[in-house]
């Protein structure tokens, strides 16, 4: 979705008294850990918006060999999930500007973060959002999948 489409969705949801949840990430090589995390985030409210890191920010944060999939495809895969109401690709290495613009009731992140190291936590709180850290699925990460693929297919 475009930013203006997401703005409209969020405005309608807030006007209807619905709880908007925002999360973000790379979601590069979608796996069950992502799905369970997104389902848990959606369960916190009525509308789940997912910000997808752009290709440039994914490269900057994950290294030169990433992303595996272009941002538009990662967003499309997420949008196909029942628990996701909207996706959009954002620029920058943090979601702080997105949080400030959308002003969700809840900002959710995976349990591989803690609120002290989560850069966006302070911005979210300043915007009135509750910060929720959700449990991760042990052993389920894109990095671990890449490692399995390397070991099996690149001896």
Image: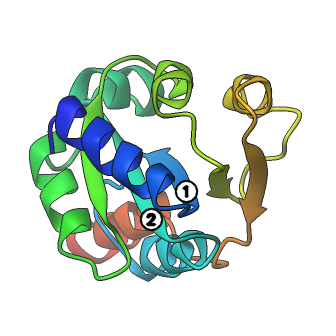
Q: Quadrant of the N terminus?
A: top left
Judging depth in this view, the residue of 104 and 56 nearest the camera is 104
Report the residue at 40% width, 54% height from top: 49
From this view, report whether residue 84 is shown above or below residue 107.
Answer: below
Helix, strand or loop status at disc 1: strand
Residue 65 visible from this viewpoint: no
Q: Quadrant of the C terminus?
A: bottom left
Report the residue at 57% width, 34% height from top: 103
In which quadrant of the rendered view does residue 147 lie?
bottom left
Instruction: Check disc 1 and report the residue beneath it.
Output: 21
Q: Is residue 103 left or right of residue 1?
A: right
Report the residue at 60% width, 78% height from top: 40
Q: Is residue 125 left or right of residue 79?
A: right
Q: How many labels sit on residues?
A: 2
> Horizontal and vertical percent for residue 69?
15, 49
Judging depth in this view, the residue of 142 and 83 nearest the camera is 83
From this view, report whether residue 50 is shown above or below residue 38.
Answer: above
Helix, strand or loop status at disc 2: strand
From this view, report whether residue 28 is shown above or below residue 120.
Answer: below
10 Å crowding of disc 2: few (<14), some (14-19), many (20+)? many
Instruction: Check disc 2 and report the residue beneath it.
Output: 47
Image disc number at residue 66: none
- Label 1 with label 2: CB-CB less than 8 Å: yes
């Amino acid at each position: 979705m475009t930013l203006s489409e997401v703005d409209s969705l969020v405005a309608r949801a807030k006007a209807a008294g619905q709880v908007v949840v925002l999360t973000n990430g790379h979601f590069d090589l979608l796996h069950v850990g992502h799905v369970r995390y997104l389902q848990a985030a959606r369960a916190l409210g009525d509308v789940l918006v997912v910000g997808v890191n752009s290709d440039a920010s994914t490269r900057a944060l994950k290294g030169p060999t990433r992303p595996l999939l272009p941002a538009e495809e990662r967003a499309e895969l997420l949008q196909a999930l029942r628990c996701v109401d909207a996706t959009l690709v954002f620029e920058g290495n943090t979601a702080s500007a997105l949080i400030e613009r959308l002003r969700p009731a809840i900002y959710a992140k995976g349990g591989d973060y803690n609120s002290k190291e989560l850069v966006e936590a302070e911005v979210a709180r300043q915007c009135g959002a509750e910060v929720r850290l959700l449990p991760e699925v042990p052993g389920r990460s894109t990095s671990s999948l890449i490692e399995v693929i390397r070991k099996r297919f690149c001896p």
